Amino acid sequence: MIAQLLYTAALLAICVVIHAMTLSIVIKRVARSDALADPNIWSTTWVLVRMAWWLVLAHLLEAIVWALFYAWQSAFPDLSSAGYFSIVTYTTVGYGDLVPPEQWRLAAGVEGLTGILMCGWSAAFIFAVVSRIYGAWVKTSPNK
């Protein structure tokens, strides 16, 4: 049980690092974009689309980290099953058609919590960026 908690703590930390690095990249790109300097619908939309791509990529990478862990621990018969279980668990869809061995059920729960936390962080980040873009629009709007 202690080993599981240590493994899951390490996996959570890896996910936080991946997410923080991704958000750092996105912040730099948003700051250099035209969406804040000269906001218009197309530049803003393109910034938001690219931001969504980066965030989804980060989430997929985080789920892959968990899948590789499950495969390493032989919790599932193959990497494909581990990957499927991981993405379903990370996103909290939880179909239930694959169930980990009893000794890894705690890890699966922590993966679900990690997914919720990372998705919440992404949502908060998107809200912050959209708020910043909206503020730029208000400042440049002729109808103040």
Image (cartoon, rainbow, N blue to C red):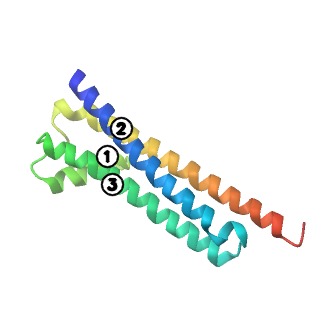
Q: CA distance from mark 3 to mark 2?
A: 13 Å
| Residue 100, horizontal then vertical, whole percent | 19, 40
Taking the view exactly as shown, the residue that stands out farthest to the bottom is 42
Is there any visible trace of residue 25 in the rendered image?
yes
> Which residue is found at the position 24% from the left and 34% from the top?
105
What is the three-letter code of the residue carrying label 2? Leu
Q: Which badge, 3 or 1, comes first in the chain's sequence?
A: 3
| Residue 129, horizontal then vertical, whole percent | 63, 57
**Tag 2's secondary structure?**
helix
> Which residue is found at the position 82% from the left and 69% from the top?
140
- Position of residue 35 in the picture relative to residue 144 (left or right): left
- Mark linked to residue 110: none
Q: Disc 2 or disc 1, which is closer to the eye? A: 2
Q: Look at the picture and state if 74 lies above or below 30.
A: above
- Position of residue 105 in the picture relative to residue 72 (left or right): right
Name the image quarter holding the C terminus. bottom right
Q: Would you name the residue on which mark 1 appears?
A: 89
